[in-house]
Image (spheres, rainbow, N blue to C red):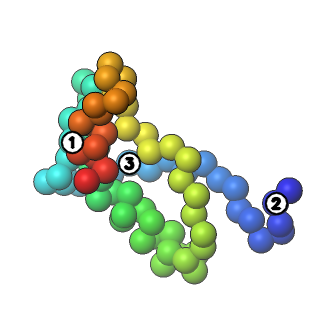
Amino acid sequence: MESENTLLATIYFSLTAKHTNSIRTNTVTIWVAPEGLRMLLNKVKNDYGNPEVLITENGYPDDGSDPLNDTERINYYE
């Protein structure tokens, strides 16, 4: 049971600026900019007083062909 101070939300965001650290994903049109997550977290911190944030999905699509040697996802997190 959540307390009255808990905010539950699903947040979707899109960055339109070109980022130099973008990573191509398995999809034709999606590039991932890892620094975008940092930008979003800084916005939440500044706009909402640094609340605790729980991230349950990173949104990185991979082909899942080799889950034990997942170099694309490793590169994403680095």
The mark nearer the N terminus, 3 or 2, is: 2
Q: Earlier in the sequence, mark 1 or mark 3?
A: 3
Residue sitting nearer the eye, 53 or 69: 69
Vertical arrangement, residue 11 with respect to residue 64, above or below: below
Query: Alpha-carbon neighbours of circle 2 within 10 Å: few (<14), some, or many (≥20)?
Result: few
x%, y% of residue 28? 25, 24
Q: Is residue 15 above or below residue 40?
A: above
Residue located beneath label 2 in the image:
2
> Of the residues tagged 1 and 3, which is closer to the observer?
1
Please tell me in which quadrant of the rendered image residue 38 appears: bottom left
Q: Distance of mark 3 from mark 2, alpha carbons?
A: 29 Å
- Determine the secondary structure under disc 3: loop
- The amino acid type found where label 2 is placed reads Glu
Confirm or deny contact between disc 3 and disc 2 (CB under 8 A): no
Q: Is residue 6 left or right of residue 77?
A: right
> Outermost residue toward the front?
68
Name the residue carrying label 1: 23
